[in-house]
Image: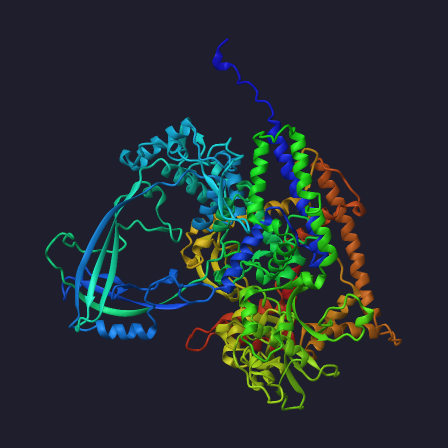
Amino acid sequence: ENSSNTPPPRRQVDMDLVTAQETRRVLDRLAGYTISPLLWKKIAPGLSAGRVQSVGMSLVVQRERERMAFRNSEYWDLQGSFSTDKHATSNTFRATLQELNGVRLASGKDFDGSTGELLHDKKVHHLTDQDAQQLLTILDTEDSTWKIQSVTSKKRSNKPPAPFTTSTLQQESNKRLGFSVSDTMRFAQTLYEAGYITYMRTDSTHLSQDALDAIQEQVTEEYGNENLASIDPNQRYSKSKPKIKTKSKGATNTTIPEVKSQEAHEAIRPSLIHGNAFVSPSSLSTSSSSSQNLPQAAMKLYQLIYSRTLASYMADRIVNITSVFLEGTSSDETTTAIFRASGTVEVFAGYSKAWGATNTNTNTTLSHSNTTQSLPSFPPNDSETITYLHCSNLDAIPHKTEPPPRYTEASFVKELESLGVGRPSTYASVVQTLRNRAYVGSPVSSSSSSSQGRRRGSSWKGDKGGGGGGVAISAVRAAGGEEFMGAASGPMVPSLSAFVVCSLLEKHCPSYVDPGFTARMEERLDRIAQGTSIGEQSRDDLRVSYLDEYYGGDEGLAALVEKMDKEVSAEEARRANLPSFQSQIKNREGEDDDEIGLFIGPWGPYVQRIESTTSSQTSQTPTTHEKGDTKPKVTAALPQGLAADPSSLTVDMLVMLLKSREKDGILLGTHPSDGRSIRWKLGRYGAYLQWGEAGDENTTNHSVPKKLGGLGGRNINLPNSEAGSTSMTAVMPDITLEEAVGYVNLPREVCYIQDLPVTAAIGPYGPYLKYNNTFVSLLEKDGDVLTIDPETATQVVTDGIINKSSKLARNVLAELGEKNGSQIRIKDGRFGVYMNWKKVNVKIPKEYLDNPSEIPLEEAWNLISEKADTSSKNSTSKNRKKNKTGQEIALPPAPKRPKSAYLYFCAEKRPLVAQKMKTLGEVSKELARLWAETAQDETGGGREPYEKMAAVEKEEYEIKKQEWTEECNKVLKDKGGKSKSSSKLSPTTKKTAKTATKTNGKRSPSAYMIFCSENRERTKGTNGEKLSFGDIAKKLGQMWKECDEETRSLYQSKAEKLKQ
């Protein structure tokens, strides 16, 4: 028998790996199922805890604490342009001041971030604004001399990156493509299932020999043999064992060998197709038939994997770094300054041809330019020739120290991997859980792009308790609302919930959020996987003893959680202690701010003042505290969105919220017409105005624009009786009594169009104009709701309401081109910029957010087609009937359901009621009241006429329904389906028929429409001038109004004939 056909021997199941996996799974359940119920009970439903997620949450919280405690420092330096020729316009270069009189200038690394002061052990010169200006005056003169002090040049070799593992793929796709960790794994799964890449969950950088041969061939073909490395990636990246660092509280940082559990798979690379070659990205997007089902994002990820794989087998990138030190001396020779200029010249591109040159400081890809700064040639240091320079444009430049940056998903994954917390294959689920539980978000206010908008609402699913995979709505409320969630590509900002849960676990269960403890746990699990035993313990004994050590005993998890449940009150557990508050409270003299607390609860964050009162029953209550009992005095909910970025919260804001609640809002003044008070108040959804005193019958609440809905830090002119302290007025919005009177008087009539009023008002979605019971949003460019003039209002109503075709063009930023008879437009909506084609809306890809009009037409069409196909598949599966063979059957349209007596009544009375009432809600209430009065009408003219009309239509409907049922049964019988009676037709079938009825052709034109089509030419002026759509519509309306009864009857008869 041929040995080549002999199958390889079967591998035995490694029970050590099985035991380690089972132990890890039990640990996860013990951790989550033990602590999560306590969080629901003490804090809010929807929260959760986990062996890895809680450590990740603590890392994000700790980074935010460092940012809150950070104190900025300002320092200055000088920068100038230098050249060898005084009159030269080229070969100039920039240099920066480094030393002053032999002492190095202070930079950002020389300051203490917690105090903002210089570090004591640093012997540097701190250049202030005044010092910089004085130095500028001394050096920026014609008598100052400038010469070359020294020139150094050295070559640096940058090695290519290793092939992708799971974590490095997640990091690079987030940095280069803007994909979230979850999206990266989803697109990688799509590519893997399509056969384009190898398995995407791996810790190994190893490549098979077949893959190495393919890489060598394609690098030679695409970039030339000179760019091929002399050693393969397996030799380059397997020389040293990687190590992981541990951060254990109270212990020094140590390193331990990293034991990887997923090295059985290769590195992530393109699959070998057609023998021993990879599919090139260009052929994947053009010629491959199966790639037509791949989303555009998956193709971009394949391009990234392809480029990284080739780059790993390419030569080093070699650059030449030149540094020039310049010496400047003042005219009196008392001041000597050393400037430094540097330039980088690429000598050999190497791997950067495939992967690009990367800036290691900012993790961004540099352009392929040969130099960062052009430096002229200078004589070597051993030359006796002195090179003098000319200085121009000498400027003083200010700098500020920056706090540690917030984690992005890329840097967060890198930190988890470096600490040895969790496994790369689980990082995506960890990040997604932190976002779903609203522990981490990316609010727009946290330096992320505002054009990203909020998180897509379609992915939000309610979550009871702590289970489920969707977003926990109660957890979102506790974190401060939807504004906190933001976009996944933004910085990872911890919520108030994260601060509260982290503080609780740090105080009562510190090892649970200790990265070092979790890393040592992973190491122990890996040793179980390796079969490393301790003494004479068996595999099962080792697992049981470890689980018992973790969960049982006096110091085990169960005992700690039980102790927390007994000793920690809900109020203590819910309190958020922000580092930024402590320093602010210390700086406020004479204020009782130490009794102000920020809390979270099931319905959102709130601030509460606690009043201490001495208990008179101390002898009867053995547990009474020394300071006495406490009771809540005032509680105020934070307006929605205010807590989206906890770093923006200040004690001033909380004090103002409480004082506003204590004083029942801020009194702005009295209304000039009736003398009733107008108060500015804060509610759950932001600021609003109250006209009248609380409890009065005529008191009403009124909306204000969103720009006045927060605590913006602008001053307000308050009556003397209400201005209790400067701290309260320091955070009030900019609103005057005159403006407040205007807002409470809304809606207001702006103008008339065709004898119908145009009114301006503010609704739940902002300012709007109302005309003929139709609404159009009032944009900021159109003007303010209080000051919009009749001309502008007429134009907005004409474009947005009267001319239906123009309504589609409203908010259009650009048009990309036409596809299938309709334009693909870039529009600006409530949640940001998006693409629109017919009724299909698609979000803008991240790389085009800065300039959406640059999206290629074909790429936009691919995204729209993908969205349209998904919607079509979803609707088809719901609205189609299948026969026995699985073939879909289209049913005839169902008859329209009859109107009720109440609907007939509303259709008749609504025009009259709408003239008296201001809002749709008031119209509905008035119609309901009038309908209730008809039941008491004993004259015979109450509900009877409407009930007769409804009965006639219902009778006609039953006849049509029976005919439709018989037709459906006939279609089902002919197509091999199962016939059903009308009473047994499924809801899906009925919905299908109802949908088909709505789309069964256009409605016949009315008499007025026929009149307009025949008389439109008559609206042109005598000189043939071109009129706007609004003027034409206005003229046609006036002409129809002047028609006699005979003319109208003629058009009505035409309409009846067309209808028949």
The one of 620 and 821 positioned closer to us in this rendering: 620
To which quarter of the image does residue 904 belong? Answer: bottom right
Specify the quadrant of the image occupied by residue 695: bottom right
Q: Residue lying farthest right?
A: 938
Q: Which quadrant would the C terminus be assigned to in this image?
A: bottom right
Residue 1008 in percent (x, y) is at 60, 69
One can see residue 889 in this view: no
What residue lies at 28% left-to-right and 33% top-to-bottom?
225
Most foreground residue, 155 or 294? 155
- The percent coordinates of residue 486 (x first, y second) are 55, 59
In percent of width and height, residue 16 lies at 60, 29
Frontmost residue, 361 versus 1058: 361
953 w.r.t. 929: above or below: above
- Going 24% across and 62% down the picture, which residue do you hit? 339
Residue at the location (28% across, 35% down)? 224
Give the side of residue 515 with respect to residue 461, left or right.
left
- In the image, what residue occupies the spot 61% across and 31% down? 534
Position of 310 relative to 396 (above/below): above
